[in-house]
């Protein structure tokens, strides 16, 4: 679980880091804003007081005294002042100004300057010029600074606490969000190839994680089906091989169980060879099936279906003549498509072979091929007037090892792989195949193949 | 010994018949479960070889039905499947033994011998009457230590008699054990074989082991 723990920690760290940046930015902006406000307030007070003094001074021309009520007002506002005459001598002082000497570095007119009085009192100075004198106003900035420091100190405590809380909250949320993931992982770990029937059964909401679980379940369904199919195939193949192997073992043990004539041994060996041939055929058919199911093993080329069918017609003429079955092939001109010619031929040959085999004497096998429009495809039908297939078999005809005629047991007849191979070949060409059949009337097989124009082979 | 082979695969059935006949069994072959129930009524089979995969009625069902109807002959099951459930199911349905394909003919006959021993008094493959000994595994007979060569039918006849020492067996009882359904019982073949057997076993000995009980049948015994 270290990976998941990492994800959790990473999530929390990222959240905390992001929050820290946000909170610090907020703190800086807040402090700047407060400082600005404080400064404005101080400077407004100084300006206001200056204007007031000027009017007072104006009304009492030449006298460097300030009326008591104004002094009282200024004191309430914590404003101290010095009044200087034209020569720069201090003629009047009030408030804190009484305790401190006038600083040397006075600001220019209309400008504010912060100075420290006597090394302990920080004040902001502002000069109001009168006709023949200057008034130097001072306002303590210590309170303002102390206030800002308090705010900064508060933030310095509050921000770490908030970050800690948010880390805790983040961890809680991450845990909450990731617990289903942990459970999915646990379930997924218990699911093995041997037991694909398990599913992730968590009561998850329809969110991303719920969707993930559903997707995994759907994938497991597909895997399960694929594995089941493989297992079934293995079972079927083992059974098919076991029968001829059983016969071989039996015959070999019989052959050596007592002394026998050469002629008798020869007969036994011929029978055994038949069993070996049968096993070889089975293996070959399985290989064909496996190859057809891998599109990259197909060799696509341009080929003409009409030509292919007429060629097959010639090939099967002898077999048809022997059974007195008529073969009629009607194919349009220019039925060119992209296909694997060998495989397509194999599929069509298989179907023709079946059609002739299951058609009684004086029957007919008709093969039609033509171009279809919308969508552009090539249609092939192979119809016989044969024995037909019972409806109960129709849905299973393309299943591997499905035999219509159970009497044709495992030492005679086919393996039930012929039609599955045909279907696999047609599928590999992007085509479709359908079987219609009626008992004692006949069977019609319809194939529809995409043409070169509408089908890009998988390479 | 009369064996009924139940096998739906014709070539396998033919091979089993050949193998068993060469070991002096009288063999009948049927290909489905329902037939078995008819055939067991018409002959007293000593053993049944039963394939599990049968059309219509599978081997398990056949076995259960036979046992329910009171048939107690040993049944050897044959199958292509070797899963544990199949074996358990086979034995629980009343089979005495179980053989998984592929198998050699020797294994089949050895198991059949073991099964017939199980139902008889002797735990060895040897049958003994007086100084006559018959080994059912090697098919060899000896009298007083002298080896006697037997044909398959002579062996089958002798074995049948020796499995019931001192008892009178009717011609029908003997025919049932030694010949299969193709044999026509009115033929004089049984006398021919009894005569041939007597010649090999009793000629030159004072005690005649193979005895004819007029009007009843034959018996093997070292008592007069």
Image (cartoon, coloured by chain):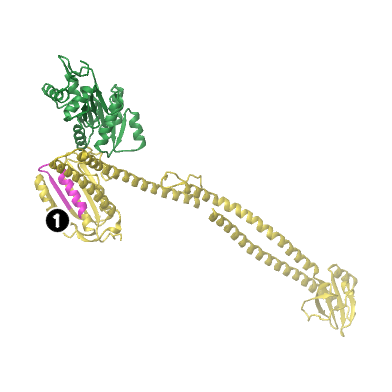
The image shows residue A100 at horizontal and vertical percentages of 88, 75
Q: Is residue A52 above or below residue A177?
A: below
* Kind of element beneath mark 1: helix
Residue B52 found in image quarter = top left
Residue A93 found in image quarter = bottom right
Front residue (pair A104, B2): B2
Q: Is residue B2 left or right of residue A84?
A: left
Chain B colour? green
| Residue bearing the label numbered 1 | A311
Q: Is residue A214 above or below residue B86?
A: below
Q: Is residue B208 visible to us here? A: yes
Front residue (pair B54, A50): B54
The image shows residue A110 at horizontal and vertical percentages of 77, 79
Q: Which chain is assigned yellow? A: A
The chain to which mark 1 is attached is: A
Quarter containing the C terminus of chain A: bottom left
Front residue (pair B24, B101): B24
The verdict on residue A366 being magenta is: yes
Residue drawn where x is 62% and y is 53% of the image? A169
The image shows residue A63 at horizontal and vertical percentages of 90, 79
Q: Which residues are magenta?
A: A345-368
Q: Is residue B143 above or below residue B87?
A: above
């Amino acid at each position: 679980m270290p990976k998941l723990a990492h994800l959790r920690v990473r999530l929390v760290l990222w959240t905390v880091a992001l929050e820290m940046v946000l909170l610090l930015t907020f703190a800086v902006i807040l402090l700047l804003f407060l400082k600005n406000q404080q400064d404005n307030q101080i400077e407004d007070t100084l300006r206001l007081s200056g204007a007031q003094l000027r009017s007072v001074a104006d009304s009492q021309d030449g006298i460097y005294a300030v009326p008591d009520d104004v002094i009282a007002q200024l004191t309430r506002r914590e404003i101290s002042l010095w009044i200087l005459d034209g020569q720069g001598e201090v003629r009047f002082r009030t408030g804190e100004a009484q305790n401190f000497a006038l600083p040397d570095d006075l600001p220019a007119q209309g400008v504010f300057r912060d100075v420290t009085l006597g090394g302990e009192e920080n004040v902001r100075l502002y000069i109001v010029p009168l006709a023949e004198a200057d008034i130097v106003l001072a306002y303590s900035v210590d309170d303002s600074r102390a206030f800002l420091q308090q705010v900064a100190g508060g933030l310095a405590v509050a921000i770490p606490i908030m970050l800690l809380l948010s880390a805790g909250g983040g961890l809680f949320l991450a845990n909450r969000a990731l617990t289903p993931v942990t459970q999915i992982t646990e379930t997924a770990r218990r699911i093995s190839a041997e037991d694909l029937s398990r599913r992730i059964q968590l009561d998850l909401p329809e969110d991303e994680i719920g969707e993930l679980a559903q997707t995994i379940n759907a994938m497991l369904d597909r895997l399960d089906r694929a594995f089941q199919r493989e297992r079934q195939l293995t079972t079927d193949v083992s059974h098919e091989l076991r029968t001829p192997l059983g016969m071989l073992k039996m015959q070999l043990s019989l052959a050596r169980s007592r002394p026998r004539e050469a002629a008798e041994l020869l007969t036994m060996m011929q029978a055994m060879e038949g069993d070996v041939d049968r096993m070889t055929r089975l293996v070959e058919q399985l290989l064909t099936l496996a190859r057809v199911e891998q599109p990259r093993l197909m060799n696509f080329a341009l080929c003409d279906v009409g030509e292919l069918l007429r060629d097959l017609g010639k090939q099967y003429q002898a077999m048809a003549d022997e059974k007195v079955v008529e073969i009629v092939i009607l194919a349009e001109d220019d039925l060119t498509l992209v296909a694997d010619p060998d495989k397509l031929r194999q599929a069509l040959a298989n179907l023709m072979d079946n059609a002739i085999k299951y058609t009684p004497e004086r029957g007919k096998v008709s093969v039609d091929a033509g171009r279809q429009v919308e969508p552009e495809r090539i249609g092939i039908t192979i119809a016989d007037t044969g024995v037909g297939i019972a409806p109960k078999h129709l849905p299973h005809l393309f299943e591997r090892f499905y035999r219509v005629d159970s009497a044709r047991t495992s030492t005679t007849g086919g393996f039930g792989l012929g039609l599955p191979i045909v279907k696999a070949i047609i599928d590999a060409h992007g085509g479709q195949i359908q079987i219609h059949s009626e008992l004692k009337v006949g069977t019609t097989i319809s194939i529809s193949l995409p043409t070169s124009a509408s089908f890009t082979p998988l390479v | 010994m009369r064996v009924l082979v139940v096998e739906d695969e014709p070539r396998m059935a033919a091979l089993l018949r050949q193998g068993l006949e060469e070991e002096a069994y009288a063999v009948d072959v049927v290909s489905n479960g329902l037939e078995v129930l008819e055939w067991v009524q018409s002959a007293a089979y000593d053993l049944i070889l039963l394939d599990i995969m049968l059309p219509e009625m599978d081997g398990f069902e056949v076995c259960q039905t036979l046992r329910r109807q009171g048939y107690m002959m040993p049944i050897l099951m044959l199958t292509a499947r070797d899963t544990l459930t199949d074996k358990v199911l086979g034995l629980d349905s009343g089979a005495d033994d179980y053989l998984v394909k592929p198998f050699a003919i020797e294994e089949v006959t050895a198991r059949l011998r073991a099964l017939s021993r199980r139902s008889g008094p002797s735990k060895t493959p040897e049958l003994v009457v007086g100084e006559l000994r018959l080994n059912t595994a090697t098919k060899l007979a000896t009298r007083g230590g002298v080896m006697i060569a037997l044909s398959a039918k002579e062996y089958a006849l002798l074995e049948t008699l020796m499995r019931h020492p001192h008892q009178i067996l009717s011609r029908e009882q003997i025919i049932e054990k030694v010949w299969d359904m193709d044999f026509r019982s009115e033929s004089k073949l049984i006398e021919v074989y009894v005569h041939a057997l007597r010649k090999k076993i009793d000629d030159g000995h004072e005690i005649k082991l193979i005895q004819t009980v007029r009007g009843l049948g034959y018996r093997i015994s070292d008592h007069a």
